[in-house]
Image (cartoon, helix red, strand yellow):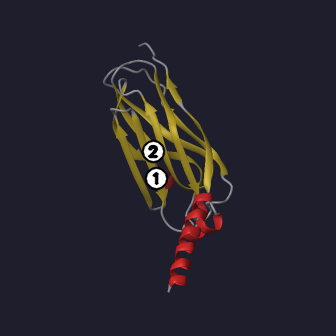
């Protein structure tokens, strides 16, 4: 009985030590990687923000589209955008047709006008379902509070392909210069 206690204590000590030094065998045994987690990230298209050229005036609605081009095997994405809340107020965020066209999707959006951030997450549902090409991911509608130069930038961009492989798209921020009437 004493030997069994010693073996159990030794085994527990060994597990703790291996976990502290990062034994990959033990890590994979206790928490196996997700499919595709260890594979190389894929280069994946370009995300950009697009607005119609227009004269900005207080009280006006401004529509900015979150677009993608040249993407391959997109399964889902999570994006956080920054904007100046003293110039813009979010009024609506709608899912675009790129992922949802002929597919069931998950779509989540959250705007924080106090911080000036927008989070948009979306994924196509179903095993092996991915989308490639170009199109509209989401449409953001704002109320213009002040007619100043407006900028919006990507704070975070995460995209996943089939098999949970990481996609690394490039992205382009937007700047709308103030225009006089």
Quadrant of res 15: bottom right
Nearer to us in this view, 109 or 54: 109
Q: Which residue is mark 1?
A: 122
In the rendered view of the protein, which quadrant contains the C terminus?
top left
Nearer to us in this view, 51 or 21: 21
Nearer to us in this view, 163 or 134: 163
Residue 55 position within the rendered picture, expressed as x and y whole percent measured from the top left: 42, 20
Q: Earlier in the sequence, mark 1 or mark 2?
A: 1
Question: Comparing marks 1 and 2, which lies closer to the viewer?
Answer: 1
The answer to whether 130 appears left or right of 38 in the picture is left
Q: Say if 7 sits above or below 170 in the image.
A: below
- Residue contact between numbered discs 1 and 2, judged by CB atoms under 8 Å: yes
Q: Residues within 10 Å of mark 1 (few under 14, many from 20)?
A: many
Residue 125 position within the rendered picture, expressed as x and y whole percent measured from the top left: 48, 63
The answer to whether 116 appears left or right of 10 in the picture is left
The answer to whether 1 appears left or right of 70 in the picture is left
Q: State whether residue 99 appears in this view.
A: yes
Q: CA distance from mark 1 to mark 2?
A: 9 Å
Residue 43 position within the rendered picture, expressed as x and y whole percent measured from the top left: 67, 48
Residue 20 position within the rendered picture, expressed as x and y whole percent measured from the top left: 58, 59
Q: Say if 144 sits above or below 41 in the image.
A: above
Q: Which residue is mark 2?
A: 138
Q: Residues within 10 Å of mark 2 (few under 14, many from 20)?
A: many
Residue in view at x 45 percent, y 33 percent: 82
């Amino acid at each position: 009985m004493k030997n069994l206690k010693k073996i159990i204590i030794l085994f527990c000590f060994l597990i703790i030590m291996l976990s502290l030094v990062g034994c990959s065998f033990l890590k994979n045994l206790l928490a196996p990687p997700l499919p595709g987690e260890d594979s190389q990230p894929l280069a994946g298209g370009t995300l950009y923000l697009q607005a119609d050229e227009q004269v900005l005036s207080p009280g006006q609605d401004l529509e900015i589209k979150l677009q993608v081009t040249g993407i391959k095997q997109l399964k889902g994405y999570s994006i956080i955008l920054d904007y100046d809340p003293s110039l813009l107020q979010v009024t609506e965020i709608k899912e675009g047709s790129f992922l949802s066209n002929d597919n069931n999707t998950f779509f989540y959006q959250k705007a924080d006008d106090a911080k000036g951030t927008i989070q948009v997450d979306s994924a196509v549902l179903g095993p092996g379902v991915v989308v490639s090409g170009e199109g509209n991911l989401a449409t953001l509608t704002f109320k213009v509070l002040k007619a100043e130069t407006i900028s919006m930038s990507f704070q975070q961009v995460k995209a996943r392909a089939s098999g949970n492989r990481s996609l690394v798209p490039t992205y382009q921020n937007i700047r709308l210069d103030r225009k006089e009437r």
